[in-house]
Amino acid sequence: MTPQDLDRIRQHPDFIQLVSRKQRLTWSLTLAMLAIYYGFVLVMAFAPGVLGQPLNGGATSVGIPVAMGVILLSFVLTAFYVRQTNQVLDPLAEKLQQECIQ
């Protein structure tokens, strides 16, 4: 590819939309995961009694299901990213590729 081809692709409206959507998706999911994880860590650091309380009077503390929730949320966010990529970003990238090949 020549530099002119690359400039033409960079200025293509579909490429601009693709980059914008991918950045927005990536940053929003990154910030969500950071907020979830660091929220959990901050609760452990500054209010350990909250997560250390026994669950229903048993040996398991409240922190165990909360920690499992953090892990499950990471899987949910990953699945959401994959679905958005497959349904929105990949078709846009394929359309751009087909238009730029011609």
Image: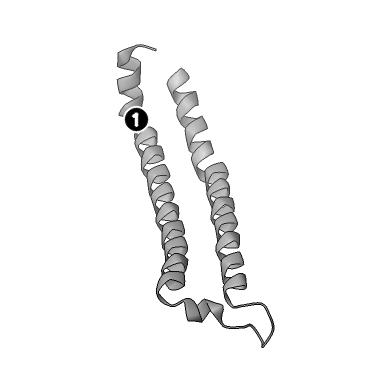
- Name the spot of residue 70 as percent of width and height, x first: 55, 64
Q: Which colour scheme is used?
A: one colour
Q: Residue at x 47, y 67 (%)?
A: 40
Name which quarter of the figure residue 59 lies in: bottom right
Query: In the rendered view, would you say 77 is above or below 61?
Result: above
Residue that protrudes farthest toward the top in the picture: 2
Kindly identify the residue that appears in the image at 47 percent across and 61 percent down. Answer: 37
**What is the quadrant of residue 5 in the picture?**
top left
Look at the image and tell me in which quarter the N terminus lies.
top left
- Tell me what residue is drawn at x 53 percent, y 49 percent: 81
Q: Name the residue under label 1.
A: 12
Tell me which residue sits at (46%, 57%) in the image: 33
Q: Is residue 26 visible?
A: yes
Q: Is residue 16 left or right of residue 59?
A: left
Question: What SS does tag 1 mark?
Answer: loop
Q: Picture quarter containing residue 22?
A: top left
In the rendered image, residue 60, in percent from the top left (x then y), is placed at 66, 77
Identify residue type, mark 1: His
**Spot occupied by residue 65 in the image (x, y as percentages of width and height):** 62, 72
